[in-house]
Image (spheres, helix red, strand yellow):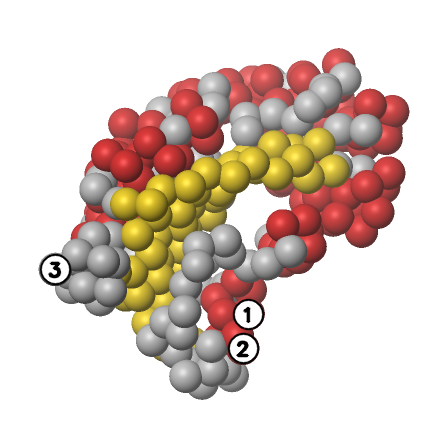
Amino acid sequence: MDLQHYALHEAIGANYLAPVEAPARILDVGQGSGQWAFDLCVEFPKAVVVGFDLVSGKPTQLGGYRFVRGNLLEGLPFVDGRFDFVHQRLLTSGVPLKSWLAAVEDLVRVTQPGGWVELAEVGPGVEPMGPATTRLFELGWRLGRLNGLDMTGIVWRSLDGYLVRTGLTGVEKRTFEVPIGEWGDSVGSFMASDLRALFTRLSPVFQARFDVPAQECAELIAAMLQEFEQHQSAGIFNYAFGRKPGRGAGES
């Protein structure tokens, strides 16, 4: 997750795109390792930065950081309008498709009037994909569908739509093509390592659920890494952000 974080930071040139200014309270929903939140503590040393997830990330001594354990699908345990900036990244694999609108509504609920919400997701595959890469992703999509997850890119294509539907203003969406593989220098190397780790951890699940032998999984992963170089593959990331109407947003 740290490699993924650093790759995205280098690819887009920042930790976020929303034009936030000196936020006092920041929330990172689905914080993962916590590195995004740690970076925001450094950028805004006077802010309180809350990382929210099912499990805690890495330990940190940063004074402004707080961790809150919880499940987004059970609702955020914060009062209305608590945060100036709410960030959520790469939760398509954790939030069922049917729950996405309600989840975004909850992000908006805990954002104060005039505050910002930002979402970021990656497309359901990489472009282009060779046969081994396609096989691994198809297994992943099959597993995701069994859990009600969006494996076709509906959420990825609709991030700005969710923000508009939940009442945010000034909504913008931006798309970034992020290289995967050594051909893409450090960013591509980090992303390839991230996908290798992902499918390595999923391999036992593929074995148990779909009877795919361990040796086949290992061979597919090795071939996938070669295909990244051969095809110069990339992941397509969408970022969307918007502002909650009210105080500080040009409205009374």
Q: Is residue 113 left or right of residue 181?
A: left
| Whole-number angstrom distance, CA of label 1 to CA of label 3 | 33 Å
- Which SS class for mark 1? helix
Q: Residue furthest top?
A: 131
Instruction: Say whether disc 3 or disc 2 marks the residue closer to the N-terminus.
Output: 2
What residue type is disc 1 on?
Asp
Depth order, front residue of 177/30: 177
- The residue where tag 3 is placed is 252
| Whole-number angstrom distance, CA of label 3 to CA of label 2 | 33 Å
What residue type is disc 2 on?
Val
Res. 245 visible in picture: yes
Instruction: Name the residue at 75% across, 14% down.
Output: 131
- The residue where tag 1 is placed is 39
**Rendered-image quadrant of the C terminus:** bottom left
Depth order, front residue of 156/148: 156
Q: Residues within 10 Å of mark 1 (few under 14, many from 20)?
A: some
- Which SS class for mark 2? helix
Depth order, front residue of 182/250: 250
Q: Residues within 10 Å of mark 3 (few under 14, many from 20)?
A: few
Task: Reply above or below: 104 against 235.
Answer: below
Provide residue 197's location: percent of width, then percent of height.
68, 43
- The residue where tag 2 is placed is 42
